[in-house]
């Protein structure tokens, strides 16, 4: 493969389109381990409001974050069967509860609007794109959990006791 072909391949990034509330978002697939259907979530007392609890998946306890709560969406109505997107953030698996996992999309890097151009605080987004007439917010999975929050999750067991 020539240098030019490699560059043309890198002009697109694959992502999973998800719906959170009325908005479309995208998560880069390189951080996604799997997409799970609605699962029973075991609540944990005294967690921040955006932590729904934990799920048990193939021997692993995975903390689940409510994406709508994390993004500060007011008056969000949780669907009866949300999806849980398992993300690899550092050495930890994190579940991100979204209303719906829609489909894989390709994000053309040339059309992404960096939030810095809008003088917007970066927060959990890396940019905005337009796809088929819709604005899609590109999420930064690593920012969905802050450094201090990641440290607070470390004591949680990663596997279930037998």
Image (tube, helix red, strand yellow):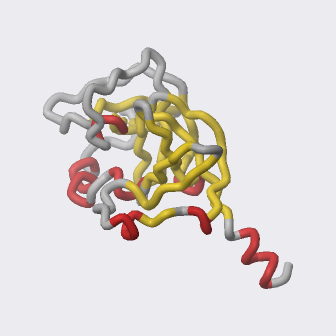
Q: Position of residue 122 (x, y in %)?
A: 33, 62
Quadrant of residue 70 in the image?
top left
- Work out whether residue 162 or residue 5 is closer to the camera in this orientation and state it: 5
Q: Position of residue 32 (x, y in %)?
A: 55, 48
Where is residue 9, by image quadrant?
A: bottom right
Which quadrant: the C terminus? Answer: top left
Using the image as rendered, state which of residue 13 and residue 73 is in the foreground: 73
Taking the spot 28% from the left edge, 62% from the top edge, the residue there is: 121
Image quadrant holding the N terminus, namely bottom right
In the displayed structure, 139 sits above or below 109; it is: above
Residue 47 locus on image (x, y percent): 18, 36
Task: Estimate the x, y position of residue 77 in percent, counting from the top left.
Answer: 34, 21
Comparing 91 with 148, the one in front is 148
In the rendered image, which quarter is residue 96 located in? top left
Q: Residue at x 75, y 72 (%)?
A: 8
Give the residue drawn at x 40%, y 38%. 62
């Amino acid at each position: 493969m020539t240098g030019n072909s490699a560059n043309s391949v890198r002009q697109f990034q694959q992502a999973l389109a998800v719906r959170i509330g009325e908005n479309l978002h995208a998560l880069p697939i390189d951080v996604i381990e799997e997409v799970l259907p609605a699962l029973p979530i075991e609540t944990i007392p005294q967690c921040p409001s955006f932590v729904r609890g934990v799920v048990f998946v193939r021997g692993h306890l995975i903390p689940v974050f409510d994406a709508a709560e994390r993004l500060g969406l007011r008056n969000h109505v949780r669907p009866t069967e949300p999806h849980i997107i398992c993300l690899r953030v550092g050495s930890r698996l994190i579940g991100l509860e979204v209303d719906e996992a829609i489909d894989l999309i390709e994000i053309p890097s040339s059309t992404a609007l960096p939030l810095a151009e809008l003088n917007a605080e970066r927060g959990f987004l890396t940019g905005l794109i337009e796809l088929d007439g819709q604005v899609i917010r590109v999420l930064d999975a690593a920012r969905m959990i802050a450094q201090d929050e990641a440290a607070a999750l470390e004591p949680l067991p990663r596997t279930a006791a037998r």
